[in-house]
Image: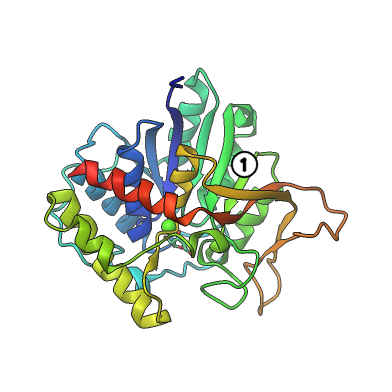
């Protein structure tokens, strides 16, 4: 029985894997991307906004609005991942300049308008630091009932990827993540245990290369992103972290989750940004998040590659 597409807003910081998340979303009838909001993280907010517009040009979706959001974390100075994604945030391809400007600089206002006029609860997906999402929690409490759930890429049960303790998105704005985790929103955390299995390598780039403008664009993104992970970590491929959030909406059987308490470290200099996941329920803290523990890698890769192939 066909069901209507899941309406959602993507809050992101493109970023190579954010770009692939946008492309997967626009190639998948199971979901309806109502709009993109941007946040500083991988790169400056201006770059993230430009990159989101470029990606939407690539998939010929000028109808999907882009609204820029927070240019810095709630209280801390911004740190970017320019070493991974390049100064402009999307090193590799050399695309044309975006065909349009952002629809506004008011991401929160856009989210508020969507939630206010929605006829059914809307899903929020976040694939960058949670700065904008924290503002949704604090400033849009009167509309939380119109948020079906927040699915976010971030955190880890075990080791971090930007410090030994912290994953990048949470590390950039731990105060925002703390506000989100303490909120009443239904939350799903797609962390590193899941996304580190969701990798693509040179073979996937070569499979798409030469299949059209989108295929070449993805191949060039992967050339950079895979090459970075091969050089920096010695891995075969690059984890396409953010695309897993979209795949999870498309097929919730891909990712296995546990419902438990997640608390954010915001004080310690050594472990700030850590998602403390009470896997064995050893604390009295109430469960507040569905935490990804495993992904069916083969079915994820098949889904992602088959959908990307339709874009060319
Ligand atoms: O740690 C991975 C996350 O940080 C991904 O969202 C990537 O795009 C970067 O933002
Ligand atoms: Ca991201």
To which quarter of the image does residue 7 belong? top left
Q: Residue at x 46, y 51 (%)?
A: 244
Q: Residue furthest right?
A: 284
To which quarter of the image does residue 15 belong? bottom left
53 or 73: nearer the viewer: 53
Q: Which residue is mark 1?
A: 137
Q: Position of residue 170 (x, y in %)?
A: 57, 62
Q: Position of residue 216 (x, y in %)?
A: 16, 56
Q: Position of residue 134 (x, y in %)?
A: 59, 48
Q: Residue at x 54, y 63 (%)?
A: 192
Judge from the rendering whether residue 53 lies leftward or rightward of residue 12; answer left or right: left
On screen, residue 193 above or below 254: below
Judge from the rendering whether residue 102 lies leftward or rightward of residue 282; answer left or right: left
To which quarter of the image does residue 59 belong? top left
Residue 71 appears in view: no
Dot 1 falls on a residue whose secondary structure is helix
67 or 153: nearer the viewer: 153
Q: Residues within 10 Å of mark 1 (few under 14, many from 20)?
A: many
Q: Position of residue 295 (x, y in %)?
A: 53, 54
């Amino acid at each position: 029985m066909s069901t209507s597409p899941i309406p959602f807003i993507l809050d992101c910081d493109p970023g190579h894997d954010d770009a692939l998340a946008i492309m997967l979303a626009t190639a998948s009838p199971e979901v309806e991307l109502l709009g993109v909001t941007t946040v500083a993280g991988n790169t400056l907010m201006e770059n993230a906004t430009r990159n989101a517009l470029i990606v939407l040009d690539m998939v010929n979706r000028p109808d999907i609005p882009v609204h820029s959001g927070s240019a810095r974390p709630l209280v801390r100075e911004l740190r970017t991942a320019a070493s991974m994604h390049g100064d402009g945030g999307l090193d590799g391809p050399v695309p044309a300049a975006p065909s349009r400007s952002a629809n506004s600089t008011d991401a929160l206002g856009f989210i508020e308008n969507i939630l206010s006029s929605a006829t059914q609860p809307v899903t929020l997906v976040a694939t960058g630091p949670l700065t904008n999402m924290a503002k949704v929690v604090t400033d849009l409490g009167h509309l939380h009932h119109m948020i079906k759930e927040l699915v976010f890429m971030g955190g880890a049960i075990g080791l971090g990827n930007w410090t030994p303790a912290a994953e990048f998105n949470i590390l950039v704005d731990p105060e925002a993540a703390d506000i989100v985790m303490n909120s009443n929103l239904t939350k799903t955390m797609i962390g590193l245990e899941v996304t580190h299995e969701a990798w693509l390598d040179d073979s996937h780039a070569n499979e798409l290369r030469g299949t059209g403008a989108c295929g070449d664009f993805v191949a060039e993104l992967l050339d950079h992103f895979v090459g970075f992970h091969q050089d920096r970590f010695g891995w075969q491929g690059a984890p396409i972290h953010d695309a897993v959030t979209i795949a999870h909406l498309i097929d919730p059987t891909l990712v296995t989750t546990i419902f438990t308490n997640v608390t954010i470290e915001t004080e310690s200099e050594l472990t700030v940004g850590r998602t403390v996941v009470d896997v064995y329920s050893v604390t009295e803290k109430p469960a507040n998040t569905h935490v990804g523990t495993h992904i069916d890698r083969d079915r994820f890769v098949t889904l992602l590659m088959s959908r990307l192939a339709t874009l060319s």
